[in-house]
Image: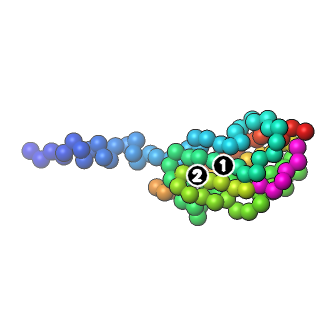
Amino acid sequence: MNRFPLWLLLSVSPSAAMAHAMLERAEPSAGAQLDHAPAQLRLQFSEPLEPAFSGVSIMDSANHSVAREASVISGVTMTIRLNQIPPGEYHVQWHAVSVDTHRTEGSYSFTVRP
């Protein structure tokens, strides 16, 4: 009787095939109340990202972008530099495509206090 080697079955397990780039850490974080405006936003994901299909936007309360330039993606990290921003609430919206082509997205807000 032919049997598949156990190592082969384990290497194609459903959990390995279901990988998604999940947001693991954000600086500033969701709901943060900051005393000083950040110079950049940094997002860290659970899987390496596909730079051509991943990105982030940061908007002020008037829905204007406060990004200085496009996001930079390296491995599991997405970084975007910010203009000098005044006190107020800021909305972050991101989308990430892992190298295995699964897409995730999310949003959150943080506040810079006066």
The quadrant where residue 24 appears: top right
Residue 15, percent from left and from top: 40, 41
Within 10 angstroms of label 2, few (less than 14), some, or many (20 or more) residues? some
Instruction: Please state the total of marks drawn on the protein image.
Output: 2
Read off the residue under disc 2: 77
Specify whether 62 is left or right of 98. right
Q: Main secondary structure of the magenta part?
A: loop
Specify whether 1 is left or right of 10. left
Q: Amino acid under label 2? A: Thr
Q: Amino acid under label 1? A: Arg
Residue drawn at x 19%, y 46% is: 4
Q: Is 94 within the magenta?
A: no
Q: Is 83 within the magenta?
A: yes
Q: Are marks 2 and 1 in contact (CB under 8 Å)?
A: yes
Residue 69, percent from left and from top: 74, 63
Residue furthest right in the image: 114
The answer to whether residue 98 is visible is no
Residue drawn at x 76%, y 51% is: 39
Specify whether 27 is left or right of 52. right
Residue drawn at x 46%, y 55% is: 100
Q: Secondary structure at mark 1?
A: strand
Q: Which residues are magenta?
A: 82-87
Read off the residue under disc 1: 42
The quadrant where residue 13 appears: top left
The residue closer to the viewer here, 44 or 93, is 44
Residue drawn at x 88%, y 43% is: 87
Name the quadrant of the N terminus. top left
Q: Work out how far the residue at label 2 is from the one at label 1, CA to CA, in angstroms.
A: 7 Å
Residue 37, percent from left and from top: 81, 45
Residue 114, percent from left and from top: 90, 39
